[in-house]
Image (cartoon, coloured by chain):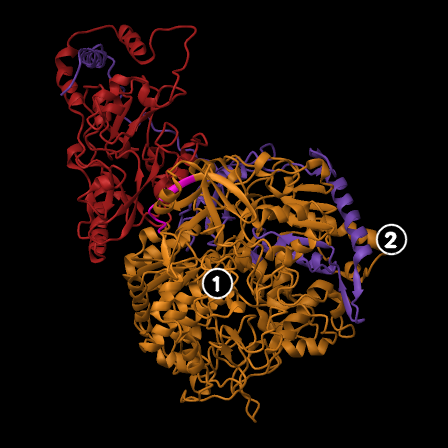
Chain colours: A red, B purple, C orange
Amino acid sequence: MASQDITARSATTTPMPQVRQVGEVAKLIDTSKCIGCKACQVACSEWNELRAEVGHNVGVYDNPNDLGADSWTLIRFAEYENPASGNLEWLIRKDGCMHCADPGCLKACPSPGAIVKYANGIVDFNQDKCIGCGYCISGCPFDVPRLSQKDHKAYKCTLCSDRVAVGLEPACVKTCPTGAIVFGSKQDMQMHAAERIEDLKERGFAQAGLYDPAGVGGTHVMYVLHHADQPSLYAGLPEAPAISPLVELWKGVTKPLALLAMGAAVLAGFFHYVRVGPNRVDEEPDPGEPTVHQVDPSVHVVDPNKQP
Amino acid sequence: MDMNRRQFFKVCGVGLGASSLAALGMAPPPAYAETIRHFKLANTRETRNTCPYCSVGCGLIMYSRGDGAKNVVQEIVHIEGDADHPVNRGTLCPKGAGLLDFVHSPNRLKYPEVREAGSNEWKRVSWDEALGRIATLMKADRDANFVTHNANGQTVNRWLSTGFLAASASSNEAGYITHKVVRSLGMLAFDNQARV
Amino acid sequence: MTNHWADIQNADLVLIMGGNAAEAHPCGFKWVTEAKAHNKARLIVVDPRFNRSASVADLYAPIRTGTDIAFLGGLINYLLANDKIQHEYVRNYTDVSFVVKEGFAFEDGLFNGYDAAKRSYPDKSAWSYEIGADGYAVVDPSLSHPRCVFNLLKNHYSRYTPELVSSVCGTPQETMLKVWEAIAETSRPDKVMTIMYALGWTQHSVGSQMIRTGAMVQLLLGNIGMPGGGMNALRGHSNIQGLTDLGLLSNLLPGYLTLPGDGEQDYAAYIAKRTQKPLRPGQLSYWQNYEKFHVSLMKAWYGKSATVENNWAYDWLPKLDAPGAGYDVLKVFDMMFQGQINGYFCQGFNPIAAFPNKAKVGAALARLKYLVIMDPLATDTSEFWRNAGEFNDVDTAAIQTTVFRLPTTCFAEEDGSLVNSGRWLQWHWKAAEPPGEARTDIAIMAGLFHRLRALYAKEGGAFPEPILNLDWPYLRPDDPAPDELAREFNGRALADVSDPASGAVLAKAGEQLAGFAQLRADGSTASGCWIFSGSWTQAGNQMARRDNADPYGMGQTLGWAWAWPANRRILYNRASADPSGQPWDPAKKRLVWWNGKAWAGTDVPDFKPDSAPQDGMSPFIMNPEGVARFFALDKMAEGPFPEHYEPFETPIGRNPLHGNVQAVSNPAARVFKNDLELFGKAEEFPFVATTYRLTEHFHYWTKHCRLAAITQPEQFVEIGEALARERGITAGDRVKVSSNRGFIKAVAVVTKRLRPLTVDGKTVHQVGIPIHWGFSGVAKNGFITNTLTPFVGDGNTQTPEFKSFLVNVEKV
């Protein structure tokens, strides 16, 4: 499992193994080949043994209506009237973890080892060590992780690290009927993207391009877009994603504060208090909309993509 | 950056905790793929099949738990596309990717049942009772309504008062024997999904 | 499909019309994306809705549902007017030079011989070729004869001008011409278009003729028989092709043999009618072998009891008195509604959800004495008697039907073969035991048959001979094994089978036959389905083969599974070569060719293997004339050339092509009186509706599957923004959609993808209604969409008009 060497680990300062020369993997999602069939969604849930609730139709094709602790990937649909061509375009994007080279979730995570990055580029959550604080959500420039209402732990796409570890492609990649999702070394995926972009330009999409945003150091999930100049057309794909400034600040103050040795037990209690509140026998679940964002409202205030 | 006092405190606290844990010697074990779930298909049994939904005829591999030993009930735990198959090449659409939930649907029928005339419920019956009652009803209807000759005296040998809709997802072998039986009875009210 | 899924990669242009392959057949659609990516192919989608196929198309054209004949008729006119046809192909491989009998006429929307009272053409005698003194059809290779097919064709479609077609279809003229222009480019011998269609063409009152019009376009362009070409019907169910091949339809026997009618009392005449002599010199007319197939079938069914003396048990076959499709489901449910049917079996079929006008179907089922359900899932039909509130508001106690529900295995729990859309028979293997006491369909049919046979043996009864003498050689009579049945439909030698020329023994008595060429009409062979002969030979189960090698890189994979007929992957493939026997496009489209001694190539030649090009045999060997037909002779109910007729529920109330009130809608379609009264008018139901599948669901099965239910949980309808504004509806509102037969309520999806069309000077809104919900399942329960649809079928097949009807939409 050499390819699964860990190269970064949340809230950890000890060095990571660096001897083995491990290649980076990437998943390339070609929006121009995607037919929005949701096979990726289903294959993901089937492989990972997830079954979201059977929800409601709220007037759109996107179902479930958002990512969730038991919905790690989601097809998002956007109808766009192209002013240049006059054509209607149905822009369809598979949403999910981007596996950033510089993962904001990992930087924001206070629990040692709850988030790791492997040498091959996969960013994985370890629920055993997750304390449910939700900081990974604020750290994520793509708004991907979700806290489960069942166990108060954060979940997201693992890039099927269990399959990749034994030499298989992720479940969504394998199932994709049209080859809109492909998997390989990051370099091969960039080359494949270049071919696809050429084809799209030949079909009149002058701005076709690859989405591999530099603000997060590049990603191990990339998109081919017909309109790479306007990523936000694709159901709000961030134009220039970057790690939240607050997370960066926090990283800055980490080191001096680390010198203050404090009891781990106290801290664990503190986190529990922050996350769940004081222990009460008669504790009721939060009324109202059961979304993870309401677990700790302060988390969201610092998200640059959201209203303060 | 807009950060209020409470947030600042919280961020500092988080940094404090995390850092001090490391400083207290709670360094990680050798950095290794500690979080990866075990590969769930190890030691499963593979069986080739064909997707029962549309007519692309995608190849499937069904993974089942148990090695077929006498004391084990084989259970299908995962289904994915057959990479060797020249049409689907390992891919499956959303329906095919979710086949496991068809095999294990809570609405699978398990026992023969009958709903008696006017009743509001199902009653479980044995196969023998179900098939015996159906055969008796068929024979009574056939004997009463079989037409050997039409009004012109021509030999026609047909039975029109019972009909049969055949399945479009059953195998050729099931379809073939169904046809053989149905025509031997003289039925003409016989169709399958191809009609609609 | 004339071709097959992986062959689509060879296309230069893909036309998806009357189907939605990306949603209904995603894994087959992959070969469209492959053609686009690696063959620079273009994709054109013509559909009432901008659907998921359209989302990846190079060109999308909207069309009013039910007007495809107008669109394609206009295209034929365009191709002829602009001389965009594959001349050599058309001249040599089609009937353009054939002279039609005097008396054939088309006037004011009707062909000659129409009987309005009967709603049909009882006299089709003029719809045929002029026959010369030599007994052959008269041809005029100069194409100057006014009654040669070419001139009749040209004349017929000259009325389909771009202006008129645009006004009928609602397709903007500019877009339409762009589509026509792109298609016309494939008239070049080295450019090929494939047409992919499905129920968007079949489910109309003129569905068969829509498909014919598409095939005629392909013939003009020289695209039939070509790799990457063809007319590709994307079948909707995993073995709907197999069940059709096996003849499980009212009027058929296995292998497209046909049941006799009442008038066919004489066996020899029955055979003679089906073994037509060649209509041109040197042609094969393959159906001359009909009797070999028929006798072999009767030997498979009745064994030793089928003898030359009893005409191979001819009288044991029921004879049809109903014309055309016979006792099709619409007719049978109308009979049931009238109280003429006592018992009914639904084997893996859910008619209350799948048939039109749910109210009528439910009322019909309630008049049955007994209903037998065989299914792996708890279908809506099995509980048609249960009151499910407004989804199924019935009086349970008043329903006197006894319902038996028998649990069956699903695919994962049985061995067997399925035929995919490309005619591949693929074997599959059992992986687990079924739940509870579920049994295979085979065991259930055997169990029923055995009990019946025992009752007839003991008590006697009506005409017991065929029941008592049905051949039943299975090792376990109550549960025949799938491989025994597969061997039986392949066929075996009952006595030694010899080559008539050399006398060499081809198959010894008892051996499996190698293919249908070994079938005999003398009772020495048995084969339950001649077109499947070759699937389980003496060498074993050919359907289980798994060699996916593709030596020519054209995706033909002859070693994978087995395709009927004779493992041939592309039908009519002789037409991929020019008259001299060389591929039209030797660089990229090599399929079969004459190598100087025989036909060879990347596929099994669909031709007499040793017939040299100079012998003049034409490629369409199943037709007595050897060529493909633009002129359908007397084979179609509505006439030899497709003509546009409006859906029975038309938003414009007239047929812009002609003023004849008898010819507004299909004049030869059968309509039952009680259904005629239920057709709605545009004044009350102003919007055009169409029903369809979503990619997330499969019919009424996957509402029982959690993973599918998650991805499309709740019933919805799609309406355009303009209509939503007009009716004060916003996305997510609940709306009531009504037709003259009932209503459903569902969530509104408001979309830019459905736009109002201008048709015959009027604005027409189209409403999209997916079908997948019902009153049981793990998905949110809902209404049965077919509550809304009209009970009228295609004039030839009686396939219901699910794709075009009128509704009203209101906010709840």
Which badge, 1 or 2, comes first in the chain's sequence? 2
The numbered mark at residue C459 is: 2
Q: Residue furthest front?
A: C683
User: Which of label 1 and label 2 is nearer to you?
Assistant: 1
Q: Using a 10 Å C-alpha cutoff, classify the residue at mark 1 as few (fewer than 14 neighbours), some (14 to 19) or many (20 or more).
A: many
Q: Residue furthest bottom?
A: C133
Whether labels 1 and 2 share one chain: yes
Instruction: Say whether residue C370 is visible.
Output: yes
Residue drawn at x 38%, y 48% is A177
CA neighbours of label 2 inside 10 A, class few (<14), some (14 to 19), many (20+): few
Q: Percent from the top left, x then y, of residue A289?
A: 37, 22
Quadrant showing the C terminus of chain A: top left
The three-letter code of the residue at mark 1 reads Glu
In this view of the protein, which residue sits in the foreground, A179 or C701? C701
Q: Is C702 above or below relative to C319?
A: above
Q: Amino acid at mark 2?
A: Glu
Q: Which residue is mark 1?
A: C646
Say left or right for B38 vs C130.
left
Measuring from the top left, give residue C685's x and y in whole percent: 48, 50
Q: Which residue occupies 49% across, 67% down?
A: C209
Q: Chain of mark 1?
A: C
What's the CA distance linking mark 1 and mark 2?
55 Å
Instruction: Kindly state the secondary structure of the residue where label 1 is placed.
Output: loop
User: Residue extending furthest right?
Assistant: C459
Which range is magenta? Answer: C748-755
Q: Is residue C753 magenta?
A: yes
